[in-house]
């Protein structure tokens, strides 16, 4: 069963705008990760946030984690066409294996 | 460093045929994983290997077998392919619970 669920399923914005996607999960976690998948490619790790962290930044990415609400958000600032991809949140399944949500499909138009 | 490599990139099988998907990593990671991704879905874990010499079932292991040949290589075998196994298969590796590194995927079609 999928632990994380991303929202929205699809998001379309223009270059320069910010993109926010959310992830909700069901059980307690040690950490939560976000991955990006360009069409037809493998997943690429973006950022990991631990359960004792509330916010983390990496370049144009900002991730927040609210363990009381069992939710996380990924903000991409000043989006570019190259950010067009699917974004997945992932939590631990067992023994380091990950449980992925269905993803948010982001389209950034010039 | 090549990272995680997978072969083949594409494969078409007939129902009942068998094949082995190969995966290798050059990052000296202990843990390796096989996932499948169906259209509009996230990845689902088929099998994983926490360390050399061990393998365990994931969420959807039926119809598959795996071999952790050595620390670098982790293969996935379909003994008798079924149309329901049409999917994109991804291999990944990690050192512990942190970042997983993914291969480019194998697109498998079973007719």
Image (cartoon, coloured by chain):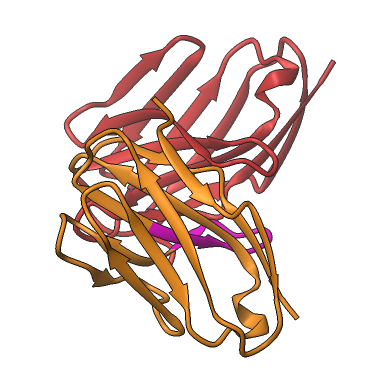
* Range of magenta residues: B34-44
The quadrant in which the N terminus of chain B is found is top left
Q: Which residue is rendered at x = 35% and y = 41% of the image?
A: B25
Q: Is residue A36 above or below residue A81?
A: below
Front residue (pair B3, A95)? B3
Quarter-wise, where is residue B61 in the image?
A: bottom left
Evaluate whether residue A69 shows in this view.
no
Q: Colour of chain B?
A: orange
Q: Check if residue A56 falls in the magenta segment.
A: no
Residue farthest along the right direction in this orientation: A110
Q: Position of residue B64 (x, y in %)?
A: 43, 78
Front residue (pair A109, B81)? B81
Q: Position of residue A104 (x, y in %)?
A: 62, 43
Q: Which residue is rendered at x = 33% and y = 33% of the image?
A: A65
Front residue (pair A73, B88)? B88
Q: Which residue is rendered at x = 72% and y = 10% of the image?
A: A16
The quadrant in which the C terminus of chain B is found is bottom right
Q: Is residue B26 above or below residue B47?
A: above
Front residue (pair B104, A63)? B104
Classify residue A32 as left or right of residue B107: left
Chain seen in red: A
């Amino acid at each position: 069963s999928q632990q994380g669920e991303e929202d929205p399923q699809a998001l379309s914005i223009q270059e320069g705008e910010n993109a926010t996607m959310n992830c909700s999960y069901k059980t307690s976690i040690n950490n939560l990760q976000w991955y990006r998948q360009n069409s037809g490619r493998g997943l690429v790790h973006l950022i990991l946030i631990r359960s004792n962290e509330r916010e983390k930044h990496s370049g144009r990415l900002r991730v927040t984690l609210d363990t009381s609400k069992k939710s996380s958000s990924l903000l991409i600032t000043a989006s570019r066409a190259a950010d067009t991809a699917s974004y997945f949140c992932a939590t631990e399944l067992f023994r380091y294996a990950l449980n992925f949500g269905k993803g948010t499909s982001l389209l950034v138009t010039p | 460093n090549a990272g995680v490599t997978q072969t083949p990139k594409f494969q078409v099988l007939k129902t009942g045929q068998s094949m082995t998907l190969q995966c290798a990593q050059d990052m000296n990671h202990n843990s390796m994983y096989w996932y499948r991704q169906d259209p509009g879905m996230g990845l689902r874990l088929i099998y994983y290997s926490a360390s050399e010499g061990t393998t365990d079932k994931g969420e959807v292991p039926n119809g598959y077998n795996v071999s952790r040949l050595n620390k670098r290589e982790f293969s996935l075998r379909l003994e008798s392919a079924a149309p329901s196994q049409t999917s994109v298969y991804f291999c990944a590796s990690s050192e512990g619970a942190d970042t997983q590194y993914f291969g480019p995927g194998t697109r498998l079609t079973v007719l």
